[in-house]
Image: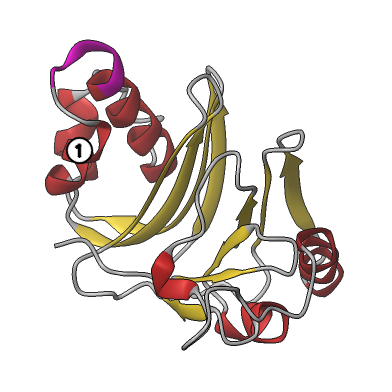
Amino acid sequence: MLAVFSGGVVEVPAELVAAGSRTPSPKTRASELVGRFLGASEPAVSVQLGDLGHLAYSHTNQALLRPRSFAAKDEVFCLFEGVLDNLGRLSQQHGLSTKGANEVLLVIEAYKTLRDRAPYPASFMLAQLTGSYAFVLFDKSTNSLLVASDPEGKVPLFWGITADGCVAFSDDIDMLKGSCGKSLAPFPQDL
């Protein structure tokens, strides 16, 4: 999976700035990175979010126990990889049909519930999730980005800076290596 967002959505994290320098040392522009991903991952699903970002995923080389999925609902877009061990309980808690519920829809609904109705930050929902997962959720209505991986890091997730200052997220380090230069690192796990 691949997600790339402009500076209008996410600021370049200090952790990714090249060692000893205040400027990143990437090699590839975001559009070239997305093109390379789509070319290497056919067939693929790709969604461009105007000038804000790009989401793409494919089932190519997907691990059996870490399926990838995508969903969009009410201007909330989510790429999800992995499984939630407590999907049934959380589906009931968030009013989803247990027959039609899957991880990506649950993450969107849990995010929206906390965003719209609860006095907690949307990231509060992360404490409820158990399993092996990584996801990138973008709320176009608020230009908010929520990126997470499980506390044990069972599903790999990496991030880096592209040549044009976008922040890229992927489960494939090799996809980002040639594009992000030294500004590449494993994404921090949720604690």
Could you tell whether 153 is left or right of 19 in the image?
left
Q: Nearer the viewer, residue 130 or 153?
A: 153
Residue located 71% across and 35% down the image: 49
Q: Is residue 6 above or below residue 29?
A: above
Which residues fall within the magenta stretch?
115-119
State which quadrant residue 39 falls in: bottom right
Let me know if residue 117 is in the magenta part: yes
Q: Is residue 184 above or below residue 119?
A: below
State which quadrant residue 163 falls in: bottom right
**Residue 36 appears at what percent x and percent y?**
83, 71
Task: Determine if residue 65 is in view.
Answer: no
**Residue 30 appears at what percent x and percent y?**
76, 61
Most common SS among magenta residues: helix
Could you tell whether 150 is left or right of 25 in the image?
left
Task: Determine if residue 59 is in view.
Answer: yes
Q: Is residue 149 above or below residue 110?
A: below
Could you tell whether 154 is left or right of 5 in the image?
left
Number of numbered discs: 1
Residue located 71% across and 78% down the image: 179
Residue at numbered disc 1: 125
Let me know if residue 78 is in the magenta part: no
Amino acid type at image mark 1:
Met
Residue located 28% across and 74% down the image: 153
* Label 1 secondary element: helix
Q: Nearer the viewer, residue 52 or 49?
A: 52
Q: Nearer the viewer, residue 42 or 183?
A: 183
Quadrant (top left, top right, bottom left, bottom right) of the C terminus: bottom left
Mark 1 crowd level (few <14, some 14–19, many ≥20, 10 Å Cα): some
Quadrant (top left, top right, bottom left, bottom right) of the N terminus: bottom right
Residue located 20% across and 74% down the image: 152
State which quadrant residue 164 falls in: bottom right
**Residue 190 appears at what percent x and percent y?**
21, 61
